[in-house]
Amino acid sequence: MMRRLSSVLAVSALVATGLLTPVAAQNAPQHPGGPCIQDQQNVSLESIYFYDDVVSELDRIERSSHGLVTVNSAGQSGEGRELLYATVGTGDTVFWIQGRIHGNERLGTQSALKILDWLTSGDPAASLIREELTVIVIPMYNPDGAEFVTASGLKGIRGSVTPNFNRDLNRDWEIFSQPESIAFWHLFAQTRPNYALDYHHVGEAHVIQGTNELTQFQIGHRPIAVSRFTEEQWRTQRAMTMVVHDAVDHIGSVNVTRYGPAQDPGFDITNAVISRMLLGGNAPGLPPAAPPGETPIDHTVDGALFFEFRNVGQKGSGLLVQLHIVSTKALLTEVAEATLDDQDISGFDSIPFPQAVSCGSL
Ligand SMILES: [Zn+2]
């Protein structure tokens, strides 16, 4: 049920294989209703990964990795599924990658698995990353949400399932009401990551603010208010954003934006996973970032981004997965080469913001 894509596609190969064409087609005006997915639209789930696929893919990757990858469980979901993660690399710097904390945001899972697959390869960049970094890959943070069958017969809701139904796990890292949050907090406390990435989809159609140009990829550089970052973290956030932007912005018709309204001082989601990783256990004025009964740890990540990709039907998913891969590889490489501090961030303020538009208006 899982269609294999070559796990390593250079940008030139992307163009050569025609993977860029679908996005160009999506950008064209469509009637009625495009570019969003419509209720009646037959969205093929043929290449979408669900929990069983995560189990079998992680098993396959671990077995064929000749000891490079180990797969473990951080605990169990509310419905008893294993919260699986893979570890690859032996370096001191720990890089955390998570996908599908929102169960209906599907492409993060296969993107994370393809990155993991590539990290086991003979590519010199992958070897360097394995040497310098320890990469933790969580392909499906919220398996219960991913598997939940809705009234319309489709799988996938945003939140977890039990003990609280449809609780947003990305708003749970202050009260830790769900078993998934507690399990992954323990993994965080145990591994103390230095960097983190979190894969999401954004459901509405967005354009570059003030234009008619569709944006496929929004870089979440600011999960918390800018004033909450340390000076070093804010520089790292901008450096990481530039690395991602530069890696993908020149690809075909891809338009990269910075997530969030341009001016929104209230944009400050402190109970999201990577937000709390950035804030650590002792952020002033905030509840402790530890489950009840646990001692907050004194650890913050140096930098953490979230990615918001367009939510599309089958047609554009191949390109979006490749954009995850190209951008994540670029970030991992930059961190492994220890060149993030040298990154030119002068172009940061020129990266545009997105603007939501109603479906069918393009
Ligand atoms: Zn999301």
Image (cartoon, grey):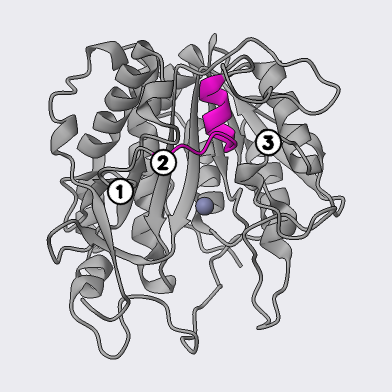
* Badge nearest the viewer, 3 or 1: 1
Mark sitting earlier along the chain (2/1) = 1
Question: Mark 3 = which residue?
Answer: 85
Instruction: Give the CA distance from mark 2 to mark 3.
Output: 30 Å
Query: Percent x, y for residue 300?
Result: 55, 16
Please tell me in which quadrant of the rendered image residue 183 appears: top right
Question: Mark 2 = which residue?
Answer: 267
Disc 1 C-beta below 8 A from ligand 1 = no
Question: Can residue 56 be seen in the rendering of this structure?
Answer: no
Query: Is 319 placed left or right of 192 in the picture?
Result: left
Amino acid type at mark 2? Phe
Query: Percent x, y for residue 182?
Result: 77, 33
The numbered mark at residue 356 is none
- The crowd level at tag 3 (other Cα within 10 Å; few <14, some 14-19, many 20+) is many
Mark sitting earlier along the chain (3/1) = 3
Whether the magenta-drawn stretch holds residue 274 is answered as yes
Residue 42 higher or lower than 85, as above or below: below
